Image (cartoon, rainbow, N blue to C red):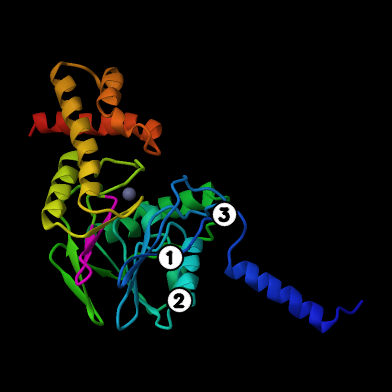
Amino acid sequence: MKIPLCRVLTLSFIVSNLWNSGWAGEPDYTLTRVSDNIQIIYGPFDLPDNKNRGFRNNVVIVSTSEGVVILDPGGSAYAGERVARTVKEHSKLPVVAVFNSHAHGDHWLGNEGIKRHYPKAVIYGHPVMKTRVQGPDGDFWLDTINRLTGDTANGKHVVAPDKTVNDGDEIKIGDTTFRIYHTGAAHTDSDIMIEVTGENALFTGDVVRNGLLGIMEEDASFKGNIAAIDFIVSKNFQYYIPGHGRVGGVAMPQTYRVYLAILRSKVGELYADGMADFEMKADVVNAVSAYDKWVGFDLRIGPHISRAYLEIEAEEFD
Ligand SMILES: [Zn+2]
């Protein structure tokens, strides 16, 4: 049977529209304006699954005179491709650079999707982040997100940063300068925070979170994370853009700082009383109860207590 050409064209039109607009049930990739030259795609708070296809972080899109710069391109190759297509819909200029805030996969696996559309885009990250991603951590994240999303993340290989940046570096792209801050171990041992000069805005990665608690692993430092927030608060930016959750003014990072500080000091107090980490959970949960509606609280509070406990214990032997 012959199918009329108009039918074929109609079908391909529908398929391509479905592809361009994503599919039902997938997260919203709508742009929200932060400042004159910064827009954000807010990531959903859900853990990676076959609906979000690994997308769960904030993707920041900066317009410069030379092209588009993306801060954290999404948590999967698929998410990176969706971000690239969103950029194409809104900008005639290409993506020329990407910054990765740290080595957790939800912040850099999108590199692969960006490179599929913009192979010349230059990707930047902290030197330790690059080493981690090129080592076992990179394959771990790629495999984990593919597995959790039922292979809908569409990741084929690890795409690490092309170039490294560290504290104090300034990268000029077109008319815009990106200033890098790294204050030591905080959320991880290789976080970078990125100031977009001229916009009075700082992208913090997961050094600051708003409404969602996440992992703090053996490379994290509660003490260092608190100090990092004190430092960025002292700069008094107009816009603080967290790795997850809504953009805010200076009160927003301070709210997360209070969580970290109460947790750490309560764990320290109970440690001094001779309690083991598992014995102190109820008391610590009570001390940080103002945060118990944050997404991920029940999942993360136990590991956060253990992490802070180990950190305090290690300081005893310094
Ligand atoms: Zn993280």
The label number, if any, that marks residue 151 in the structure image? 3
Which mark is nearer the camera, 3 or 1?
1
Query: Which element type, helix, strand or loop, lies under badge 1?
Result: loop
Q: Residues within 10 Å of mark 2 (few under 14, many from 20)?
A: few
Query: Which element type, helix, strand or loop, lies under badge 3?
Result: loop
Query: What amino acid does circle 1 point to?
Result: Leu
| Badge 2 or badge 3: first in the primary sequence | 2
Q: Are marks 1 and 2 in contact (CB under 8 Å)?
A: yes
| Badge 1 or badge 2: first in the primary sequence | 1
Q: Quick check: 29 left or right of 292?
A: right
Residue 212 percent coordinates (x, y):
36, 43
Above or below: residue 80 compared with residue 66? above
Per the model, the C-alpha gap separating discs 2 and 3 is 29 Å
Per the model, the C-alpha gap separating discs 1 and 2 is 9 Å
The residue beneath circle 2 is: 90
Q: Main secondary structure of the magenta part?
A: strand
Start-end of magenta stretch: 192-206
Query: Which element type, helix, strand or loop, lies under badge 2?
Result: helix
The residue closer to the viewer here, 69 or 160, is 69
Query: What amino acid does circle 3 point to?
Result: Asp
Q: Is the N terminus in the top left, top right, bottom left or bottom right quadrant?
A: bottom right
Rendering quarter of residue 269: top left
The label number, if any, that marks residue 148 in the structure image? none
The residue closer to the viewer here, 144 or 295, is 295
Query: What amino acid does circle 2 point to?
Result: His
